[in-house]
Image (spheres, rainbow, N blue to C red):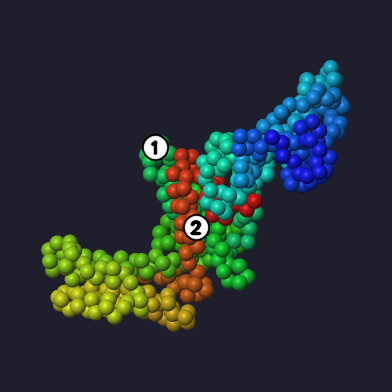
Amino acid sequence: MSHHSSGCADARSAACPCSRCDLLLGLDGVHVEAVERLDGLLVVTVSSPAAPAGCPSCGVLAVGRGRRRRVLHDVPGATRVRLIWRQRVWRCDDPDCMRRTFVEQVPTLVAARGSITMRAVTWAIGQLRREHATIAGLARQLGTSWKTVWRAVEPELVKLAADESRFENVTTLGVDEHIWHHVDSRKRGPKELTGMVDLTRDEHGRTRARLLDLVPGRSGKAYAAWLDERGDAFRNNVKVAALDPFAGYKTAIDDKLEDAVAVLDAFHVVKLGTAAVDEVRRRVQQDTLGHRGRKGDPLYGIQTILRAGAENLTEKQRTRLAAAIEADPAHDEVFVAWQCAQQLRSAYHQKDLAEGRRIAEKVVDTFHTCPIPEIARLGRTLRRWRAAFLAYFTTGRSSNGGTEAVNGIIELHRRLARGYRNRDNYRLRMLLAAGGLTP
């Protein structure tokens, strides 16, 4: 049954004489001839206005040879939408021309050999970027296949990825690694990827992290090679380089970003302190009871309390902590280690950066002399990273937190897609999802 706006002529045999349907369709270069609902589909027949055409090869005025029907997938609404494009066919009469016939092209409507409208491609990219959609989900909505959707979307993403304007005005750079697959590396290549993230703050001081690139491997060499590719202008513009405590990335920063200040990520520093306390607890547990922690063991009962900030403990938790430490004189070692970790943590919680730096300097200067071996090892680590550790307090609390947030987005989209098999597709999808590509 044909459905048309009130006042329109029968659209089955002629184009609609009013412009209301054209306005509702919103596609440049074509007008509506008919609108029908068939088997749960909204079918819209469109065509381009009559106009002369020259042969693409020789330029001779071509002769019309009628039209052919071409089915296109458009943005779905309450139901799926199909466009029936009555595409014009032309014939070149020049006997010397190798081209005999050709068809009209409307680039604003659809790509030359595509079956998804450009409007639907733009919609699909928006869904992938903002709504955590998957290619398979979009294929279901459009009523087509995964390959058809990706074949339409991929060229647009490749075009966006080739635009290096996203590397402009980057003054703070973060780096981190992640695992992109869990199968045999001989089949799918390196499991690790290194991701570079723009952590530059806006005029209000807010960090709006966005993924800049993903490269194979987890090494200083991979990071350094990427920095080399960016050129002198990019490297000279970077003033702060945030990183986790991985020596390979630090070496690349020292070699390639000579004017940048390396900043050790606060979260990972505190994590090192918490891990040291956990190691002390397990060692003392083993030394005093001869086995790993079990239910009912004093130290086993406070393992989560030892990982919390002192200011967040309730009275009940403080009582449990005190009881567990007093249960055995050997437990004092655990308490001292916990206090050291709390001191390290407190440096980052000071409102005054100068006071935070003073505490951090005291930590660096004293921890390595601690008789508790795990704390002494932590102190030696912080001494090796002294400049990057203290840089947090001179760079306005710069950290790698935005990079971790981007990693969270990447993990979410990888889970939604049930994993990836093609690294190039993975890179494009993650650049789009994590803000690296802006349509």
Residue, disc 2? 406
Q: Residue at x 74, y 47 (%)?
A: 24
Q: Quadrant of residue 378?
A: bottom left
> Does residue 109 appear left or right of residue 293 in this picture?
right
Question: 73 or 300, which is in the foreground?
Answer: 73
Mark 1 belongs to which amino acid?
Arg
Q: Quadrant of residue 205?
A: bottom right
User: Vertically, is 187 above or below 319?
Assistant: above
Residue, disc 1? 186
Q: Please provide percent x and percent y for residue 437.
A: 60, 52
| Badge number at residue 87 | none
Mark 2 belongs to which amino acid?
Val
Q: Residues within 10 Å of mark 1 (few under 14, many from 20)?
A: few
Disc 1 element: helix
> Does residue 16 appear left or right of residue 417 in this picture?
right
Q: How many marks?
A: 2
User: Vertically, is 87 above or below 6?
Assistant: above
Quadrant in which the N terminus is drawn: top right
Q: Is residue 260 visible?
A: no
